[in-house]
Image: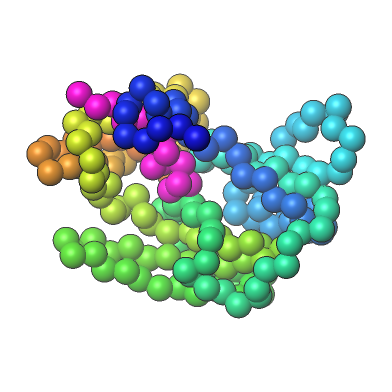
Amino acid sequence: MLPPGRSEHRVPVRCLNHVSRVCADVEKAAAFYRDLGFSDCRRPTSFDFDGAWLYSPHCSIGVHLIRGNPPPRPSKIDPKADHISFETDCLDSVEQVLVRRGADYIRQSVIEEDGVRVTQIFFHDPDNNMIEVCNCDDLPVVLLNNCQTCSVAAWERGQATKMDMGESGSRSIRNSSESVTMPLVLDAAMSMCSDMSMVMERV
């Protein structure tokens, strides 16, 4: 176990690369994630087990599906359960996809103290893994430690690989002493990836 607190003991991770899901029916699960904007991509031929790889150019995140026996999960949608979260510019479009698929979902809004409204949609994939889609990029990232700077390496990587996706947005990142703005070039980024991509440097 790494000693806490000291910057030299921190593991220098960059961002989330992919999420793996064990699924009972690979094609059914793959079709579900395709509806969320993921595309099939090549999977290593050396694998001796069934599965599928999908990738979203909008958020630079992969979903790796593995055929197997997924652990039992409750069918009731609970926003407080563990989940992965994606950002989107159009929650209504996501809701239309879910309605078309006949999927159950919960839509709710959370209003923060500074007046920012975040809307969330929670639903399950075919194996009852919880997924959230939201406009969480509207919510400022408020740092609680002594961090003074946040690297924009993730933004630069996104600039190098982005497609024609329109005008860049921005996300406010602040602490008690200053505020900086990180441009966002992704119109649908995984919020967990957005938060993990920021490499903190203590000065």
Magenta stretch in the rendered image = 190-203
| Residue 97 appears in the rendering | no
Q: Residue furthest right?
A: 48
Q: Count the marks.
A: 0
Instruction: Give above or below for 190 relative to 185.
Output: below
- The residue sitting at 20% across, 24% down in the picture is 203
Side of 40 relative to 182 (left or right): right
Side of 150 relative to 155 (left or right): left
Viewer-proximal residue, 164 or 124?
A: 124
Instruction: Give above or below for 24 relative to 56.
Output: below
Q: Position of residue 7 (x, y in %)?
A: 32, 26
Q: Position of residue 86 (x, y in %)?
A: 49, 52
Side of 8 relative to 15 (left or right): left
- The residue sitting at 64% across, 61% down in the picture is 129
**Residue 192 painted magenta:** yes
- The residue sitting at 47% across, 68% down in the picture is 80
**Residue 121 painted magenta:** no
Q: How is the image coloured?
A: rainbow
Q: Quadrant of residue 172?
A: top left
| Residue 131 appears in the rendering | yes
Q: Quadrant of residue 90?
A: bottom left
Q: Position of residue 176 (x, y in %)?
A: 12, 44
- The residue sitting at 60% across, 39% down in the picture is 18
Viewer-proximal residue, 29 or 34?
A: 29
Side of 78 relative to 34 (left or right): left
Q: Quadrant of residue 119?
A: bottom left
